[in-house]
Amino acid sequence: HHPPRHPDPGAPGADQPAADADGRAAPRALATYDCKVQMRQPADNAGHRAQVIRTGGLSHGVLDGRAAIVTGGAQGLGRGFAKALAGAGASVMIADLNGDGAATTAAELADAGFSVASVQADVTDPDAIDHMIASTLETFGDLHIAINNAGINFNSAAEDTAIDEWDATFDLNLRGLFLCCQAEGRHMITRGY
């Protein structure tokens, strides 16, 4: 069972969340991401990998007036998330343990006309997470979207993985994710989303 949702935050009645069968407010859809994945097999079929083709994306302006945090936003997937969100109109706080990298990415996106800022943040530290959220609220006035992307992978074979690598991986990839979701959720719940 899926509760009814308003497809557009500007739609009539969007200020009143729809309710599910138990009378609880249903979450509003802020944006949809239409991604179609197609597999294309090489013509020669000579053991080459099939290519994945992705089409679709966030529409320009669909996130106008929204504020987002992207952890691990200095490079890679996080940088891509930050660019996509900013391109869709969101104001984006780029957070990363590498503060210089986050600042560089933010400067590149700001030079392209996007509303972005950066903050150095260790997402395994609850105080640093609180600072990250406070910086976002101070800069953009609210927080609507959280992309908790920060993570590491040492790429060690299981039999060769040192326990400190194991601990660091789970500290960031699980504990850090939980701490970010918890802190961001506290803010979002009080705001009704």
Image (tube, rainbow, N blue to C red):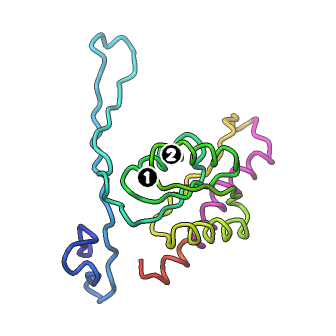
Q: Earlier in the sequence, mark 1 or mark 2?
A: 1
Residue 68: x, y in percent? 49, 62
Amino acid beneath label 2: Leu
Q: Which mark is residue 86?
A: 1
Looking at the rendered structure, the secondary structure element under dot 1 is: helix
Query: What residue do we see at 51% from left, 73% from top?
Result: 141
Q: Position of residue 14 (x, y in %)?
A: 25, 78
Name the quarter where the C terminus is drawn.
Answer: bottom left
Relative image position of residue 98 (x, y in whole percent): 70, 47
Prevailing secondary structure class for the magenta stretch in the rendered image: helix
How crowded pointer 1 is (Cα within 10 Å; few <14, some 14-19, many 20+) is rated as: many
Label 2 Cα crowd, 10 Å radius (few <14 / some 14-19 / many 20+): many
Return the residue nearer the eye: 110 or 66.
110
**Residue annotated with mark 2:** 109
Find the magenta span and give its range. Answer: 160-183
Disc 1 marks a residue whose amino acid type is Ala
Quadrant of the rendered structure where residue 12 is?
bottom left
Q: Is residue 1 above or below residue 105?
A: below
Q: Which structural element holds mark 2?
A: helix
